[in-house]
Amino acid sequence: METVQIAIAGVGLVGRRHADAINQLKHVTLSGVVDPSAEGHAFAQDRGVPCFDTLEELFASQTPDGLVLATPTPLHVAQGLEAVGHGCPVLIEKPLATSAREARTLVEQAEEKDVPILVGHHRRHNPLIRKAHEVVSAGGIGEVRAVHVNCWFYKPDHYFDEAPWRKKAGAGPISVNLAHDVDLIRHLCGEVQSVQAQSAPSMRGFENEDVAAAVLRFENGAIGTITVSDSIVSPWSWELTSNEYPIYPPTPESCYMIGGAHGSLSVPDLRLWKHQDGKRDWWTPIAATTLIREASDPLVNQMHHFADVIAGRAEPLVSGREGLRTLKVLEAIQAACKTGEIVEIHPGQDIEIEREYSSAG
């Protein structure tokens, strides 16, 4: 297997995690870093690779097989287009862009030039999500009728004080935290057709919301509810329940519940609930079976997948088009919160909302 050379633009917290993932794969190497900061240059020196201030300098000096964009969101489209212009496959951290309209420009250009774009919704690469998807898509709970997603946690005051942009309009938990959750429920339950939603102003006096809830209607007729807050003390969020990232103390709870006509599945504990003897009767005892799945690092799995896409051995699991669809649902939630109306989601049609977005990403 030939070695795949991948460069990383932006080596903050997320970019460094991608570099660590590369380091765990024998057939993938870090070819260079794009980061104008002193920290970026120090990181590159420590890893023994060249550091460039711009993508233009990177592509003038080398031809990487792929590029990871872990830069602030407002830079994604311009930098993605630059990579596509060089025929370089690119893995772009979520969200794909600051708006679906901007994302569409990038996605269509990449599709026209047949350059793969992957979006960093890495949770799809978690073995427990692969198992949940396998069960649901194989009819293990029957037709999906409802799904509930809980995304509650408490971010301390210093989290906001260290980066004041987090207090601004457009940087609330809808845009910052729900992208992964929306992507997963689309992956598990199907496409969203319409959205109703409400939000409440920050109790800490910030410009954005600190709690929101949405009702989602899926194309297959299922109904979903999703709530998010960064000001609720709770054990029910992906970060605390999945044991995916060691900086979050794990809890034995679940944050997703998927209800079907023949059973229900909770995630991430993968408990499959059914009535005894195949009966569907609330007077018949119900019991859970905990499903067995593998355990591996989803970021490493994602990087391995990126290398396979580059080599032509796989199609993107989370393509640019998939990232665009998730972004449209997020915009629909924001628009519904602003207007109080039902927002329909139509393929190829953008949602008109007034949107403020911090340049800090």
Image: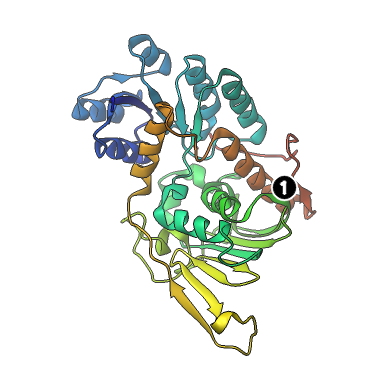
Is 153 in front, or is 63?
63
The answer to whether one can see residue 155 in this image is no
Q: Is residue 257 left or right of residue 2?
A: right
The answer to whether one can see residue 116 in this image is yes
Residue displayed at 44% across by 44% down: 163
Which element is circle 1 on?
helix
Query: Count of labels shown?
Result: 1
Most extreme residue toward the top, as rendered?
A: 60
Most extreme residue toward the right, as rendered?
A: 341
Which quarter of the figure has residue 293? bottom left
Most extreme residue toward the front, as rendered?
A: 277
Is 158 in front, or is 65?
65
Q: Position of residue 27 (x, y in %)?
A: 27, 31
Residue displayed at 45% across by 66% down: 270
Residue 116 in the image: above or below residue 13: above
Q: Is residue 29 left or right of residue 88?
A: left
Q: Position of residue 38 (x, y in %)?
A: 29, 26
Coloration mode: rainbow
Which quarter of the figure has residue 203? bottom right
**Looking at the picture, which amino acid does disc 1 mark?**
Ala
Is 279 in front, or is 288?
279
Quadrant including the N terminus: top left
Q: Position of residue 50 (x, y in %)?
A: 26, 19
Instruction: Tell me if mark 1 has few (under 14), some (14-19) or many (20+) residues whose alpha carbon lies within 10 angstroms of its own.
Output: many
**Residue at the spot of label 1:** 335
Residue 264 in the image: above or below residue 3: below
Q: Is residue 143 left or right of residue 315?
A: right
